[in-house]
Amino acid sequence: MLLNIKNLTVAIEGKEIIKGLNLQVNKGEVHAIMGPNGTGKSTLAAAITGREGYEVTEGEIWYKDQNIIEMDADERANLGIFLSFQYPVEIPGVSMTNFMRTAINAQREYRGLPPMPAGEFLKLMEEKKKLVDIHSKLTNRSVNEGFSGGEKKKNEIFQMALLEPTLAILDETDSGLDIDALRTVAKGVNELRSEENAFVVITHYQRLLEYIVPDFVHVMYDGKIVKSGSKNLALELEDKGYEWLKEQSLV
Amino acid sequence: MEKDTLQQALPLDQMLIAQYRNNKELITANDIQYVSELREEAFQTFMESGFPHSGMEQWRHTDVDVLTEDAYLNEIEVPDTKKDIEELFRCDIHNFDTETVSMLNGWYIDKDSPLKTLPEGIVVGSFREAMKAYPQIFEQYYGKIAPKNANGFVQINTAMMQDGVFVWVPDGVKSAKTLQIIKILNKEEQLFVQSRNLIVLGKNSELSLMHCDDSVNQQSSLVNTVTEIFVDENANLELYKLQNLNDQSGLINSTFVQQMANSNIKTNTLTFNCGLIRNNIHVKLDGQGSHADVLGLYLMDKQQHIDNQIRIDHNVANCTSNELFKGILDEEASAVFNGYIHVARDAQKTNAYQNNNNILLTPTATINTMPFLEIYADDVKCSHGATVGQLDQEAMFYIRSRGISAANARLLLMYAFAADIINEISIEALRQRIDDMVKKRLRGELSVCDKCVLHCGAPEKEYHFDIDLSKI
């Protein structure tokens, strides 16, 4: 098993957001996590990727047979965990090229590999740019600076393509995307899918799942996964909305 | 021997007053009459005012007593030993061809001649020689750009300075190369060094000037520099100041600029190291259509202190100014920024912008930032902003989530913060070099070594960070 989350409880500033969550992800699988706003989906992403201020008060996160809850974000990334941000951060003054080369070499160093030669890196960039149809001029600019919403999301997938993670968490990658950008992003993800990696796709809407077809769909409500099923569950949710969850959980 | 004993025994102001009285003939020996007259006037003012102290509003956050109460050696006679400054300090910036003039312990080093005319027509040389050769220029500009009521440091400089750099760019002349003034301190004794520069740009002229202050040893010193700059109509000036002195040293740097119609200046003050620095930059926009960019970057740590006092006078209509100072303060470093914009009564259509951004890396680092706008015209645009913050935690997580260590993420963000200022350097080779210096400084590798960072003797030791920050 690639990722095994056991009875996870996460608090932010003492307030419990995730309340005993379980999730198992194997290599080769795509899991979708759906649910209304404020149920802890992004908190789950933050807890898996090691964001500071997200305190695991109970439970375990096992990844590649290690409990990673004490690890720093950069170490988790070096172990192959990637987060596509819901709100990618602008970093004026740091060029995309510099940023990604630094990241790739940091990960290579962690794995005991020598830094990637500049020529090889540039070739890799060119190759991956095509994957998400990212404009050359964007990679010469500062990280996310002045990028449109769609460009920022494409840029996340572009970074993912360069880093080739084993576990990728896409946090509302579809939000703010028009249909063309959504297709491009989905195409990028689908091309990266393999038997050796896994995806956790967090989304509000079923729309993205038409393009990135999940193996499993989980519904989160009030800090827990309340329902799991096949891709058809997403259609059901689209049809019925989330109101019935509230009723169900009150019972 | 007796003289030295006297110098070592008294606090600086008393020593200087005694020295002036006892050696007036020697001090004025090289003068034209006009310069001597100003000395006397300034000396009287200094006797009354003394050095500024922290009881004065503009010096409230910078205690210069620690410097001025000390005893120093102030040389008023040209030292006999002629050291070859090229040996001491060799300029070696790749693709950066400069015209270099050097000063050692405050004295102009005339390796060819004390006053020379460059092929394009720029006159550059020793201040003490220039006043005799160009008395009319001195009478027209010297002592007139710095205000008469300037602080005690300016007064004592006017009273007792012995040398400095003179640059005259005649009408229509454009500098072919960047002119670089290298000032080095290297002496066994604790020195008080005063230098005085006069820079005059004629109509439609252009000058790119770099002014480096460096120590080459660990001896403490106090440098008091006054620079007066006149920028005539349609002239363009770029002025880069690089400050890299040791932790024991103090630098008081006063720059006064007067701009005429449609002239442009850009100053960039880059402070990498020094115990205590005070930069006074005062720009008078006296001709319509003139523009001033006044920029600065300071990277301080330990118990270093920097105080940037910027004053822009919009004296006539239709002028624009832009101030941007950014600083990163580590450990117990402290900084002061005071941005004063004065818009005169009829200076309509003024557009003045001011910004000061700071990152404090520790809870013990401090910044006092004070915008001050005084506006007497009604049709103006003036804005100011100041920020004090830590490194952006969102960005830290974003970078770390890609596998980059916390230390490298910090470095990347600090570097990014400084990039706004670095990117304003229009000379490509210099920008790359400053870029390297900033990275080195942020890594804590930049030190006051036997060679200035800008002139690291051996090319193979030159830093090429390229795009690889992984070895930090």
Image: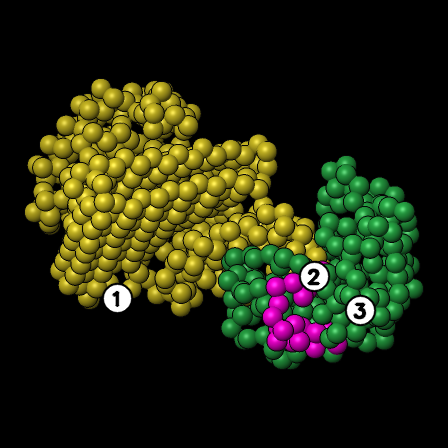
Chain colours: A green, B yellow
Q: Which portion, as a residue range, is magenta?
A: A166-190
How dense is the environment of label 2, judged by Cα within 10 Å: few (below 14), some, or many (20 and up)?
A: many
What amino acid type is highlighted by mark number 2?
Answer: Glu
Please state the chain letter of the residue tagged with numbered disc 2 in the rendered image.
A
Q: In the rendering, at what x and y percent does residue A171 appear?
A: 71, 60
Q: Is mark 1 on a helix, strand or loop?
A: loop
Q: Where does label 1 land, which residue? A: B176
B212 sits left or right of B125 in the view: right
Which kind of residue does numbered mark 3 sit on?
A: Leu
Instruction: Find numbered disc 3 in the image and state the secondary structure of the residue it sits on.
Output: helix
Q: In this rendering, which labeled residue sits more in front, label 2 or label 3?
A: 3
Which quadrant would residue B59 be assigned to in this image? top left
Circle 3 is placed at which residue position? A235
Q: In this view, does B117 lie to the left or right of B75?
A: left
Dot placed on the residue nearer the N-terminal end, 2 or 3: 2
Quadrant, the N terminus of chain A: bottom right
Coordinates of residue B414 in the picture (x, y in percent): 55, 50
Residue drawn at x 78%, y 45% is: A17
Which residue is identified by label 2? A172
Check disc 1 and give the amino acid type: Ala
Question: In x, y percent, where is residue A178?
Answer: 60, 70
